[in-house]
Amino acid sequence: LKRHKISHVKERAYKCNFCDKSFKCFAYLQSHTQNHTGEKHHNCDMCEKKFKYPALLKKHQQIKHSAERPFRCDLCEKGYFTETDLKVHKMN
């Protein structure tokens, strides 16, 4: 609901100090600013990798640290987390 209310705000009061972009919400500005500063606040607790966004951390943990591999090669039985990775494997 909070995000929906923000979508109706016309004024973009939060301006980036690095470029000409402006935002309706301070959190959006903070997220955008990371593109300029290279900050990565989301750390993997299983390895040393750091990520800008929680979604990227979650995907990393699923792919690198999970045993789940639902897409299996019918020739060698090697498993992959995504169907795209399996397709790349089959092309090579």
Image (cartoon, helix red, strand yellow):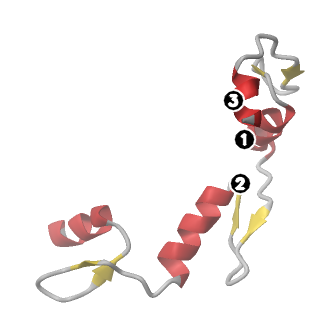
Q: Earlier in the sequence, mark 3 or mark 2?
A: 3
Residue 66 is situated, as x and y percent measured from the top left of the image, at: 50, 83
Q: Quadrant of residue 47?
A: bottom right
- How many numbered discs? 3
Q: Is residue 82 above or below residue 8?
A: below
Label 2, on which residue?
A: 52
Q: Quadrant of residue 71?
A: bottom left
State the SS at label 1. Answer: helix
Label 1, on which residue?
A: 35
**Residue drawn at point x = 80 percent, y = 52 percent:** 39
**Residue drawn at point x = 42 percent, y = 83 percent:** 68
Q: Are marks 2 and 1 in contact (CB under 8 Å)?
A: yes
Label 3, on which residue?
A: 4
**Residue drawn at point x = 60 percent, y = 66 percent:** 58
Residue 17 is situated, as x and y percent measured from the top left of the image, at: 88, 26
Return the residue nearer the eye: 7 or 51: 7
The kind of residue on which mark 3 rests is His
Residue 59 is situated, as x and y percent measured from the top left of the image, at: 54, 65
C-alpha distance separating marks 2 and 1: 8 Å
**Residue drawn at point x = 83 percent, y = 39 percent:** 30
> Can you tell which of label 3 and label 2 is closer to the viewer?
3
